[in-house]
């Protein structure tokens, strides 16, 4: 099967699971997208896909929304547990690779074409790292350092779980909400689908959050509270991204992705985002030169998985084989 698509690729998030077959010569096959709620767990989702294939996969690479450590691994925003060795045996795989979903996505950034992203600011690319940020069910972050074709590697991050940093009394009520409901307020609590709903509840004085798609729909129709919620979402995302740009030295560019941005579409306030992104005191002038783009491609994680398993980009990864069980630290 040297020319066949003998790799099973899976992008497993808190809300959706995307699967395809990939081979070094034939590239990726059609992507199947399903709601995670339709499956009992990771193994169930993968087995359902594999039953429809003409031949079983010999290898699999998973991009999954969790910190990759020694198993069993628990997803952050879904009550699924991944036992890598058990999954490898169940699928009868020769090789199983597991990486964080945003690690895989960041590895795919260098192969994005001009039509695969929307330019929010052209900027002047510097020699530093590239940064990928994505609000979805959670808030993903990963950085890519090194040059394409050279010693390129991905740095994993759980930056979304850092405490919310915003200077201004205007969101005191949000901090109070965070302390009451969660004990603390992290960036992910607001920069996610549920977070957009809480921002709308804050602006509308509602007792419970509104589902994110409804907030986006109301904003598109001109509802004041919804438009304020989407503007605050854009502003907070800009502040978060700007801080991480400084932390990672990401002057080569910042890319935005994630289901929440897809849902917001035109109601995402790019001007509010960039204003907060650049508001970094003595580094404001430097920030204004950083390129910012919004990813349009829906297969970013699969592009990254292909580069990782092909050796084009190093990444923190758990790799299991029939003969050995070990973790690669790159």
Image (cartoon, rainbow, N blue to C red):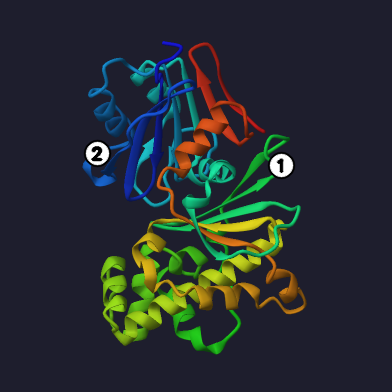
Q: Which residue appears at 55% of the width and 57% of the height? A: 255
- Counting from the top left corner in percent of width and height, residue 88 is at 41, 21
Upstream in the sequence, badge 2 or badge 1? 2
Q: Is residue 69 above or below residue 218?
A: above
Residue 165 horizontal side relative to residue 211, left or right: right
Q: Which residue appears at 32% of the width and 16% of the height? A: 56
Q: Where, by quadrant of the figure, is residue 163 drawn?
A: bottom right
What residue is pinned by disc 1?
147
Q: Which residue appears at 45% of the width and 84% of the height? A: 173
Q: Find numbered disc 1 in the image and state the secondary structure of the residue it sits on.
A: loop
Quarter of the picture holding the N terminus: top left
Q: Is residue 163 above or below residue 279?
A: above
What residue is pinned by disc 2?
39
The Cα atoms of the two marked residues, 2 and 1, are separated by 39 Å
Residue 74 horizontal side relative to residue 208, left or right: right
Residue 99 appears in the figure: no
């Amino acid at each position: 099967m040297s020319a066949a698509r003998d790799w099973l690729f899976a992008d497993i998030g808190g809300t959706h699971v995307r699967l395809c077959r990939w081979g070094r010569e034939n590239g990726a096959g059609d992507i199947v997208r399903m709601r995670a709620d339709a499956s009992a767990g990771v193994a169930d989702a993968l087995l359902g896909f594999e039953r429809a294939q003409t031949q079983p996969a010999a290898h699999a690479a998973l991009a999954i929304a969790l910190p990759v450590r020694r198993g069993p691994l628990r997803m952050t925003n879904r009550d699924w547990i991944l036992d890598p060795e058990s999954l490898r045996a169940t699928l009868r795989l020769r090789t199983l690779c597991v990486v964080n979903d945003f690690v895989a996505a960041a590895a795919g950034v260098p192969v994005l074409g001009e039509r695969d992203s929307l330019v929010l600011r052209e900027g002047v690319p510097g020699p530093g790292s590239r940064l990928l940020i994505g609000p979805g069910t959670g808030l993903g972050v990963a950085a890519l350092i090194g040059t394409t074709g050279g010693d390129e590697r991905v740095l994993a991050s759980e930056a979304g779980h850092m405490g919310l940093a915003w200077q201004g009394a205007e969101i005191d009520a949000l901090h109070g909400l965070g302390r009451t409901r969660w004990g603390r307020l992290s960036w992910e609590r607001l920069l996610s689908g549920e977070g957009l709903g809480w921002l709308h509840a804050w602006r509308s004085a509602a007792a419970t959050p509104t589902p994110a798609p409804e907030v986006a729909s109301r904003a598109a129709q001109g509802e004041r509270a919804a438009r304020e919620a989407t503007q605050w979402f854009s502003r907070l995302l800009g502040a978060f991204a700007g801080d991480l740009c400084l932390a990672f030295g990401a002057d080569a560019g910042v890319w935005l992705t994630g289901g929440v941005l897809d849902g917001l579409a035109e109601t995402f306030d790019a001007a509010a985002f960039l204003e907060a992104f650049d508001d970094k005191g003595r580094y404001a002038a430097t920030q204004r030169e950083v390129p910012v783009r919004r990813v349009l491609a829906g297969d970013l994680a699969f592009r990254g998985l292909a580069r990782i398993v092909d050796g084009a980009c190093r990444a923190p990864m758990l790799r299991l084989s029939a003969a050995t069980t070990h973790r690669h630290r790159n």
